[in-house]
Every structure is written in C-alpha cells, then in structure tokens.
Image: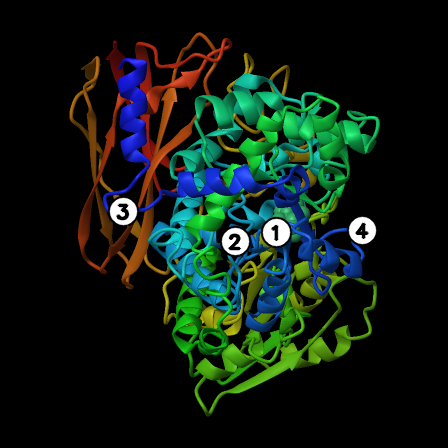
Amino acid sequence: MKKASFLLVMGILSINTFGQKTIDQKVSELLSQMTLNEKVGQLVQYSGFEYATGPQNSNSVTVLEEIKQGRVGSMLNVAGGEETRNFQKLALQSRLKIPLLFGQDVIHGYRTTFPVNLGQAASWDLGLIEQSERIAATEASAYGIHWTFAPMVDIARDPRWGRVMEGAGEDTYLGTQIGLARIKGFQGKGLGNLDAIMACAKHFAAYGAAVGGRDYNSVDMSLRQLNETYLPPFKAASAAGVATFMNSFNDINGIPATANKYILRDLLKGSWDYQGFVVSDWGSIGEMIPHGYAKDMKEAAEKAILAGSDMDMESRAYMAELPKLVQEGKVDVRVIDDAVKRILVKKFEMGLFDDPYRYSNEKRQKEQTDNLENRKFGRMFGSKSIVLLKNQNNILPLSRSTKTVALIGPFGKEKIANHGFWSIAFKDDNQRIVSQFDGIKNQLDKSSVLLYAKGSNVDDQDTSMFAEAIETAKKADVVIMTLGEGHAMSGEAKSRSNLHFSGVQEDLLKEIAKTGKPIVLLINAGRPLMFDWAADYIPGIMYTWWLGTEAGNSIADVLFGIVNPGGKLPMTFPRTEGQIPIYYNHYNTGRPAKNNTDRNYVSAYIDLDNDPKFPFGYGLSYTQFKYADMNLSSTNLTGNQKLNININVSNIGNYDGEEVVQLYIRDLFGKVIRPIKELKGFQKVFIKKGETKEVNFILTPEDLKFYDDELNFDWESGEFDIMVGTNSKDVQTKRVNWVK
Ligand code: NOJ
C-alpha cells in the first residue's frame, strides 16, 4: 500500500463509526499534555502497606503525596472497595487526574481459594481451570482489583524450586494450554467488563530453570532450549492478548531478564508484536546492581527501560532516574512515550477514565464475600485435582458406614494451610475453610465415629504425640494419615533441598503402619515430595496438594467415592532428590540405559534407577480403562496431510469415571536431537461403566516443528513414533513416515 493511502486508512480506522475518538487518539492527546515527570509517574508502581509481598522500601507518607502529584501509575496490594476508592481519590487530585491501576497476586482464587496451581494442572481440565479464574476475576474485581499477576507460565522441571506450586508443571504443551485457559478466565469477555481483570504472563522468562532449583538463581541455557521449552507459553499468551507481562528475577545467559533486549525487544515487542505492557518483578530493576549488571540505580533504570520494561514495581529507580536520563539524552523520550502509551491504553480499556471508581463497589464486594456457588465450584474443582497414586486391593473408596475411622497427622484439623501459599489478602481469615476433619465428618454416617490424633508437628523432632496416635489408630477400622509439607514450605522463596516428609512425619507413619491397620495416606504439598517408603508399603495414597477453601469436603468426596478421582501428575515424581532434574521428555543420549540392571557404561546412576517413582501424566481411578489398538489414517504421509488418530477407550471397572487420554510423538532422527517423547495432545473423557468412547486426535506438520541450532522453526521428513496412553510411560506406539 502506498504511504499516503496507508495513512488515510489508518486515519479512518482511528475514528470509530460513531465519530468518537479511539483509545489511541485519546492516549495521544493525553500524552501531549503530560510533563516528563507525569509520564515517568505512569511507569511507577508501589505496594500498599498492608500485604507486602516482597521487601518494602516505600514510606507510606511519601507514596500518598506522590500519588497526588501524579507520580504513581499503579499500586499493588491495595484492595477492597473502600481502600481502592481512597487511593483513587488521591490520584484524582493530580493535575491530569489519571486514575491508578490496582494490581494483586490473585493466583489460585481470591476470596474463595482453589487448589494451588500445580494441583489445578493435575485436573488436566481446561474448562474447570478457566472457570476458576472467571470466579477469581469476578471476586477480585468486586474488591476493586483491576489486574492480577497471573498466570505464572514458567515451565519447571525441578521440584526443589518452591514456585512449582504456582505453575502448570514440567510440560510445555500442557503449560501452554493451561496458561491460555487461565488468561481467558481472568480476562473474560474482554477488558472493560466489570468482572474482567487484566492478566499477566509471568515470569518472563525461564525463571523455572533456576540452577539447583534455588529461587532467584541464574539460568544458563541454549537459546534453542529457551525457545523450544520455556518461551512457547509466553508466545501463546502474547498472541492471545494477555494484558501484561512481568519480568523474571533471574538472568538468562548472563543478562538479567529485566534488561534482556533479546526476549523483550527482539521477541516480545518485536517479532511477537506484543501491544500490552511489561511490569518489572518486585524490585527487579534495582536488583540488577547485586546481579552485577548495573553499577547504580541510574544505570539499572536506563538498561531496563531501553530493553523494554515499562513499569517499575517497587525499585524506585524509574522515578528517581528516568527524567535525568532523558534530559541527558541517554534515553530517548519516545521510549518513555511508548511505555506510557501502553499503560494508558490499558487504563482506557478498563474504563477507568470513564469512571475511576467503577470497580470499587461495596455492594458487589459484599455479594462476593462468601459466595456459596463459588464454594460449590471450589469443592468440585478440588476433588478433580486430586491424584490417586495407589489403591492396593481397592482400599479406596472407603465406606461411609465404616464404624471407626481415625484421622492422624498434623494436617487433620489444620485450616489455614488448606489455602496454599498465595492467599495473601485473606490469610488470617480461617473461619470459612473446611478442615479435613470436618470434611470427613460431613461424609461419614451419623453412627460412625471419627477419631483424631495430631501425631506430630510438620517440621520438628517432637515424638511425644506418637503414643496417643498409635492408641487412636488401634481403635480404628481404617486410618487416614495426613502428612506433607506446610503451605508456606512451597511458594516464592521456598526452595527446599530435602523433599522427603519433614520432621518426624515418616517415623510416625511407620509407627502407625506397625499397628497393622489399613492406611490411606493423604499427601498435602505444593510440589512433588519424595515418599519412597510410603509408596511401597502404604496401600492407599492420594496426592491432595493444597485444595483451598473447600479442601476438607473435596478430599472427603474422593475418599468416600462421591467423586471418582481422575487427576494426573503434571510433573514427574522422582524416587529421591538425586534424580533431579528429571522430566519425561528428555533426550535419549548416545548410551541410553535399557533397563535398571545394566548400568555399565550407560547413562545411568550406579546407585539409583533412572525411572521416576511416578511418571508424568500418571494417576489412577476407582474404575479401570482399557485401551484398544489405535487406528491411524495412514502410516505414510506427505506434505501438509493430516494424521487422524482414533482409539477406543472402554471403562471396564465398576464406577463411572474420567480418563485423560494422552498423545505423544517422537521424531526419531533430526538435525538436532529430539526428545524421546513430546506431549502433543490430550483429551479428558467421561466414560460410564461398561461403555466405550472413541477418542480422536489430529496431528499436522505444525505439530512436528522444532527449533534447530540456528533457531529456524520447521519440521523435517522422516519417521515418527505416535504414542497414545494413560500416562507418559504406559503407551502404545505406531510408526509413521512423513515426508515434505
Ligand atoms: C514477586 C513475585 O515474584 C511475583 O510473582 C509477584 O507477582 C510479585 N512479587 C508481587 O507480589
């Protein structure tokens, strides 16, 4: 198109059909009235004073004053109708009356908390995940919140990293689908609707690959690996219109993500053409000084803004340094303008210029304070997130008329722990949480007895409660043990080197096992824990994560068979820490180990098996599913043909149930080596007992593409294994030849 006609078309597009100004025009007009300080003010974000989620530097009095002067664009951790209204009033005293954006970590629910995100991922249920974020957005927006710092779409293969609880696990495909579902849930029918909040794809990028699983640590990896494994969920989020991105704390190959031009300018704002804005992580601009990448705040601010980080969360670098940097000619004012525009666009889209108080609505807040429908959903979602790991001799489900049940373990009567890590806003409000004891009690027949003994604390050496627990177990027909890690033992800054049950919990379990009573073990955790002994000797094991407000009811629903569990692990569960990092889609190596016995000069440990305790995608049901042989539409394909894969799955057990049918491929040879398996599709199907369902997948050459060593993204002719199964280990395989 010629330049003149292009400008004409753009001109017409920027005035809508009613002759009103478009957002772009309004933003440009506003920008033209702004002083440099007011512009930089829009790039500044401070935390409220009640719920700091990081080390705080701000002095409350100066922050309030700065808001009035138009030197603050956003606040985080300010919530509630009244509080947001009060802050907004201050912003409206500023010269240009630009409203504030209120952000908060709405991570696994808000007023109603849902399973921690890794638990949600175990449901493999994109519809439920989206719905849970719809609810979270409805509740949060009713509390005046405009913006959540979620979803975290960091792929993580190391359970030592505490933040695995906040993501979707180890797999890029699953993580991408879940990230998209969450964004859809948060942003609903679009920004501007009262129940929609802005989402934030974080942490950009590769934060989950911190060396040694230690939070905030460095990341060193090939660009090929970065593009293939860690970036796809972000790229998809950008394409789906996620409102914002957040930097990560780590460096990538020596350059902190906050000032990483490659990921921010070349990819995100370059080839991905992202239109939203990027917020730093808490203090991450200033942290480039200890990183050794900036000698002072001034250099940190310069590097961050030039790389494309638009908003400064809590570093205080932008306000202090950017005006000077512009005046000195080190930062072009157009760079600032671009960042300001991106932020103002979002404020317009949220409708804040029409009514800055539209989300601060006490009536809506009250309606969402204890919404029974949301709790009902949370109960169901919790039960769908549980993974049944072992069910020897069908010890589960338990009968509701079991005469005497003993609940033993430090989590039995716990309330607050069920919230999981990110429930900051209501962390002290434990009245509404259903404990495991109460949930089980609710389900047991009135004539049954539920005994309880704590047995031990979560994390100390105190064995003084053992005797009482043993006596309690002896009186019971069945014992439910509830062990694991405390909810504040996984999450941000919660890396652990020892992932076995902490304190004396395993000793307690062994003592109770000696009574000979049948035991069902509930494992409460935000990450894969290691429990080799229990996995071998305890007949019933359910992984219950942290399930949120309705935790006790969700757990009881599965224990007593009201819900048939269908969750599958979104991360590989190692045998012991020595296997970490361990993930299903690894390479074959030149000397792959064939089995666990031949360890001589092959890629193996001399003292530990290679295979994990439980593979990625693993999870049992109270019923059994039988897979027939898969049918392929062809085993010789050319060019852009599609491969249809059909398989019949029958429910041959005694309960209706849900199965997650998983599709993997392996590209046998390539110009760069390919993983032994890659998830390419899954379907969660409900099958009534005695019935069969046909499950269909379609593969296209698009699914065969990969990054080569020069970062070309394409596929190659050759042989591919097509695998379908119930988890990443138990699959059936057929080979196809696919040529370009
Ligand atoms: C630091 C965390 O890394 C980030 O995920 C969170 O959103 C911010 N703090 C704000 O609380």
Q: Which amino acid does label 2 sit on?
A: Trp
Q: Determine which residue is flagged by label 1.
A: 74
Side of 480 where 721 appears, left or right: left
Q: Residues within 10 Å of mark 4 (few under 14, many from 20)?
A: few
Q: Distance between the residues labelled 3 and 4?
A: 59 Å
Amino acid marked by disc 3:
Lys
Residue denoted by label 4: 57
Q: In which quarter of the image is residue 215?
A: top right
Q: Mark 2 points at which residue?
A: 147
Cβ atoms under marks 1 and 2 closer than 8 Å: yes
Q: Which residue is drawn at 50% across and 29% down?
A: 231
Mark closer to the chain start, 3 or 4: 4
Quadrant occupied by the N terminus: top left
Chain-order first, disc 4 or disc 1: 4
User: Is residue 232 shown to the viewer in this render?
Assistant: yes
In the rendering, which numbered label is found on residue 626?
3
Frontmost of labels 3 and 2 is 2
- In x, y percent, where is residue 131? 37, 58
